[in-house]
Image (cartoon, helix red, strand yellow):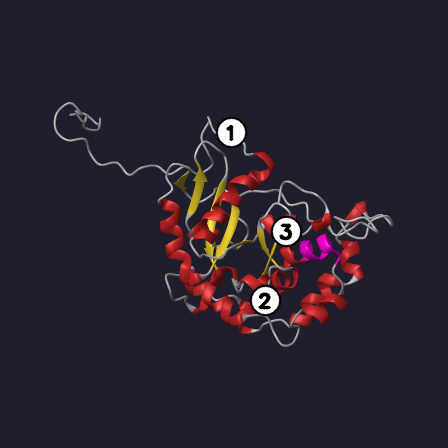
Amino acid sequence: MTDRPPVINLSNGPVPDVEPVQVVEGNATDRLALNNGVAEIRSVVDLLEQAGILCCMVGEPALIYYGTRRVMADWPICVPTEKLTATTKLLEKNREILEPAGPSAIRRVRSIEHLFARFKFVGLALFFVVMSSQACNLPCKPENFEYSQTGIPYPKLHVYAQCLLDTLSYVDLDDLVDGMILTEEWGEANLDLQGFVDTKWGRWKADFTNNGKAPQDRIPMWCHKPPERRTIWVNAAAKEGKKSRQGLKYSELNETRFRKRGSKDPRLRKRDYC
């Protein structure tokens, strides 16, 4: 008797099927992409646009574009929900430059990025995730986009601010406010502050993460008692909020955590990394 597992003799008989292991965080021989991989991501944007698929960047890339000091991880790319399957198939065909990747080991809090297709550039430690516009709660239309100086599409400021407001993305909203020095008055002029946040989207997300139908105890409490949009906006954009978020580093020279008084719109600066 022996406790040893049986030995598989690969010299006799067929080789057993083994599920291929998807790369998660890159290979030892991968190179780092220059400037956060802007040139490579631009090539993906071009590929999608040539196929008639609109897209824009969300998450960290968008927040960096709007002046925050976020650290780049993956590039989340938002595409129209009805084009999500076609987008994935198109990217899968480009095996000479792209390969499928497993979900990142680093996840944003309450993120659902890990439930969407993730790709890696061959030979580079550079990843992107393709997400549906429904998941981002962002209308994926050309009139809602603007392009950086490097040719990368991003949601326009008011569109992205509304998205973060309606999805209760408090941290990202605070960062966006501080990156662009947004005010209460700007919100009144550019956002829909009437009523409550988007509980329909909150329930959709709960269902999406629970095999299509979330039990009652998995539906976020804010869907049952949603906060008012205007209250959230005022808390984020008020001068007191901008000051308190600077913490011990507060200085009269700074307008926010990310901007000095009198500094110009970060989108006007020459930046090769967004």
Amino acid under disc 1:
Arg
Please give the range of residues in magenta: 174-181
- State the mark number for residue 166: 2
Percent position of residue 205, x then y:
47, 63
- Between residue 114 and residue 63, name the one nearer to us: 63
Residue found farthest to the right:
252
Residue 172 belongs to magenta span: no
* Left or right of 212, for residue 54: right
Which numbered mark, 2 or 3, is in the foreground of this view? 3
In this image, 218 relative to 273: left or right?
left
User: Which of 153/238 is in front?
Assistant: 153
Could you tell me residue 161's position as x and y percent?
64, 62
User: Which amino acid, by three-letter code, is at mark 2?
Assistant: Asp
Label located before the other in sequence (2 or 3): 3
- Amino acid at dot 3: Leu
Observer-nearest of 194 and 36:
36
Q: Quadrant of the N terminus?
A: top left
The label on residue 63 is 3
In this rendering, does residue 115 appear at all? yes
